[in-house]
Image (cartoon, rainbow, N blue to C red):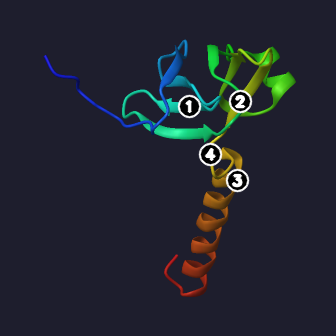
Amino acid sequence: MEPAIVQNTGREAISALAISDDGVYVGIGFMDGSVGIYISFSLQCAKLVRNVHSIFVTSLSFVNDNEMSRVTMGNYDAAIVSVSADCTCQLTKLESRALFSVWLVILLCFIAIGATALYLDYAGLL
């Protein structure tokens, strides 16, 4: 049986791995202290932060997505805590990928509808 997808993660060996609770993201810790967040269904790298730690990552855990974590850390798609043999614990966040606020898109739609109505009225087609 062959793997469905194979993704090269670079030259560094993987030292830790975690999967988000919803299964959307895979977190990978590397021997050089870097941390990566990958999209699980395609294994595309969403974020790679080099040298988060000065030595290899020993453990990873995704932060639960709830109201308290959003209030504390702001808006993000995923956040992962990494622990290393350098005796540090680091938080890496994947910022929200939304380009526009939903409310902005709705407002722009109403403006476009209004502008279209004004144009049709001016042209005598309404």
> Which label's residue is closer to the chain start, 4 or 3?
4
Q: Is the Cβ of the residue at disc 4 closer than 8 Å to that at disc 1?
A: no
At numbered mark 4, what does the secondary structure look like: helix, strand or loop? loop
The residue wearing badge 3 is: 104
Q: Is the Cβ of the residue at disc 2 closer than 8 Å to that at disc 4?
A: no
Name the amino acid type tagged 3. Answer: Leu
Q: Is the Cβ of the residue at disc 1 closer than 8 Å to that at disc 2?
A: yes
The nearer-to-camera label among 4 and 1 is: 1
Label 1 neighbour load within 10 Å: few <14, some 14-19, many 20+: many
Query: Does 98 sit left or right of 41 as displayed?
Result: right
Q: Is the Cβ of the residue at disc 3 closer than 8 Å to that at disc 1?
A: no
Q: CA distance from mark 3 to mark 1?
A: 29 Å
Label 3 neighbour load within 10 Å: few <14, some 14-19, many 20+: few
Residue 30: image location, x then y, percent: 56, 26
> Which label's residue is closer to the chain start, 2 or 4?
2
The residue wearing badge 1 is: 37
